[in-house]
Image (cartoon, rainbow, N blue to C red):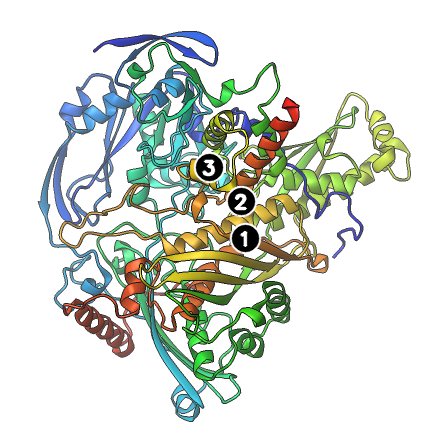
Amino acid sequence: MPWPKETKYLGKSTPRAEGPAKVSGRAKFTTDVAPAGVLFGAILRSTWAAARIKSIDLTAAQAAPGIKAALLVHNGEYLTRYYGDELAALAGTSRQAVLDALRLIKVDAEPLPFVVKELDAIKPDAAQVFAGRPNQGNNPARDSGRPDDAFAAAAAVVEGSFATQIELHQSMEPHAYAVSFEGDEMTAWASTQGVFAVRDGYARNLGLPQNKVRVICEHMGGGFGAKSSLSIEGELCAKLAQAAGAPVKLVLTRFEESLATGNRPSSFQKLKLAADKDGKLTAFQMDGFGTPGYMASAPNGGGSNGVALPMPYLYRVPNSRVKQSAVAINAGVACAMRAPAHPPAAYGMEGILDDLAVKLALDPVAIRLLNDPSEVRRHELEVGAEKFGWKAKYQKPGSSPGPVKVGIGCASAAWMSGGRGTQAEAQISSDGTVEIRVGTQDLGTGSRTVVQVVAAEMLGIDPALVTARVGDTRYPPSGGSGGSATTASVSPAIFDLCEKAVEELKKTSGLDDPRGANWKAACAKIGATPLAVTGRWRDGLSTGGAGGVQFAEVEVDTETGFVKLRKILAVHDCGTVVNRLTCESQINGGVIMGIGYALYEQRVMDRRSGVLLNPNFETYKLPGIGDIPAIELLLLDMPERGVIGIGEPCTVPTAAAIANAVANALGVRVPSLPITPDKVLAALGQVPDNGDRAAQVRDLEGAFARVAGAERPILLTETPA
Amino acid sequence: MPAVTELNVNGTRRTLNADSDRPLLSVLRDDLDLTGTKFGCGEGQCGACTVLVDGVPIRSCLTPVGAIGPQKITTIEGLEKDGRLHPLQEAFLEAGAMQCAYCTSGMIMSGSALLAKNPHPTDEEIIGFMDGNICRCGTYPRILAAIKRAATAIQGGAK
């Protein structure tokens, strides 16, 4: 990789370029944008989990004070399939006027049977989310080798059931759009992970020329996968602006965010794993299912929306059989969420691997060293175990004395990352300042500072001389910020741009090397017309394939069931670190999101009403500052691999490591996330069973049996992103 | 409905005409163009809308503007003094205590109220005070570090 060996800025810590605007409240997010004369938009949503919508009467709402536009989302009769589904939209002169008018809309609906729980949805007599189609799709078994023979010949076989919850993105800034038309030009401000994806979505869905649509996202309050493309509220915002002949802003409430903007699918995994006497894995079997919401059985093929897990995750097991299916329920649809499919895969696979280690009386780190195909990750296991003090701390499961038991666990992650096509342009002025424009966006990861750091390093100048402009489709194109791709996409384009700038400046200035100490003198020769150069992503400066291992130490109170985290050690690699300050911050954040997944967060649906029961921050439990243990980071610097993204791998193994630590503390496994006190006590046999639990186990076993036995029907065509 | 026609915001008398039962957050953002204070949940659960009223941190999304009266409101825009950032704003920059930063205004307002009341907080006191402010990017370790850094800076400045 041609990145410099000795660096001044690359791999060091540079404060955020946009920091001063953010700490002073000046940074404008989409929710803060207010074009002159802007109207407020709002959406009427289904209050039925399933219903035939016969008609919607907008007359009274249209006539209400302040209302300037009203529209239907669907024309004619419509079948709504979840509580929260978009039915109509209004725009008006104040938020209150629109909220008042929403109540005047008359909906004639015939409620229909519904089902909102996975284990209910797979029963033969369940209400069908799409009439005439089974709720449960199925994939053909993916076999390799001879799993039956290998299980029969194995020295040790373990089986276990693992389940993960629906997790909600809950970015702090809700989904937000503001749209303004002037003549045939449209400007949209969007809280988005992809300004170009939103632009193209608008052009396609509204029939507009791509070159007449401009999308701006200056600052962005988090997305985590849920803001990757034009969403329906964005489309409605634009249609309301067209209908009203005035700019419209539409910001979702937290309630709407929870219902209708995507989620991480659930998983139910029945796993079986075998090894020879040394602990080398020989066979793996999985029967699994999960729900991505109502679309799983849609007639158009639906899509698994990431229900399928990449199993047996990062291990290469010579004999395996994997069967998975998506189950439709009457609830909002899943979408990409930070490392789609990986955290549940890690929870299942790393859990069953620990159970196998226990059976073989092997150390969990040792069984991973024996089976992990990645040399980098084996190194991470070794240096991590050393730093964590693994050998001194490890005790046999459940052997910690007293009512508050201590345990440790570890788990691994793999992520493909990788960069892709990005272009950038720069104007270099005679005073030596550089303005670089690139049509990426900053989700909060600090992409402006990435531009600054790379340019400062390559040009040998102070980062303060570089101004980075991002978040506008008028800048040269870059891809969406997903798949941990942004830094690996942007950095090579800036590298390329800087090489060209140096070549041009050599000619302009006559200096052999215009960089560093010569920069000011070289730029002084530029004259009145700035030097303009472009750069584009090129191969050889970034790669993919980040790994990581995390170690957790917990204490579990066996009388209350409460899990307290003592410490997390996160060991990760991301090639050339561009800005250490923001890189480490992302890892902290990934670990903390993993803590929420492990211990607190879950979407809860009500079986009787079909309603989401916890659509707010009071009852959907996010980690707070008091829930965070000591987090230690160990970042392997591997400049020879080029730039690799870090945003997703760092959240993958956290919950798995915590779950393994809890199992080590207790000597029994809590079979689902989140690990709440009631589940800990149930796993310890301290909750009286009135027969419900046996029924639940029967339901689950029945579901797994159906997955295992089902023949080839629909779906699960996607491979996890 | 009685209207609020005057507010003392960031040391300035602002005139307006707002229904008294509207949330202070909405009046600050929509009527006074002070958009540094954010809407996160609208239910007082996330702290993104935190402002100070006579120095006390409150959730502006749940506070009717009519309840403010002549009390002094301080928003993130009013924390600078004489063109200089508050020590906690400086500390957030130095510690890199933000990612998307949608929660940052609320974090800084809460943290500044803590430091005004208790210039030498322990880690436990900081955590206890800040536990109602949510950061979905998970920047808590840096936020804790920034508040400690600011406390040290304030003590140094006072000597």
Quarter of the image for the N terminus of chain A: give it: bottom right
Q: Chain of mark 1?
A: A
Q: Chain of mark 3?
A: A
Whether residue B33 is visible, yes or no, is no
In the picture of the structure, the residue carrying the numbered disc 2 is B141
Q: Foreground residue, A351 or A573?
A: A351
Element at badge 3? loop
Depth-wise, is mark 1 or mark 3 nearer the camera? 1
- Left or right: residue A589 versus residue A103 is right
**Are the residues flagged by discs 2 and 1 in contact, CB closer than 8 Å?**
yes
Residue B63: percent from the left, percent from the top? 31, 23
For marks 1 and 3 on the same chain, the one whose residue lies earlier in the sequence? 3
Residue A470: percent from the left, percent from the top? 58, 35
Give the residue type at disc 2. Pro
Label 1 Cα crowd, 10 Å radius (few <14 / some 14-19 / many 20+): some
- Left or right: residue B152 versus residue A407 is right
Residues behind callouts 2 and 3 on a single chain: no
Give the residue type at disc 1. Ile
Residue A61: percent from the left, percent from the top? 17, 24
**Are the residues flagged by discs 1 and 3 in contact, CB closer than 8 Å?**
no
Q: Foreground residue, A617 or A534?
A: A617
Task: Reply above or below: B52 against A327.
Answer: above
- Left or right: residue A94 versus residue B137 is left
In the picture of the structure, the residue carrying the numbered disc 3 is A221
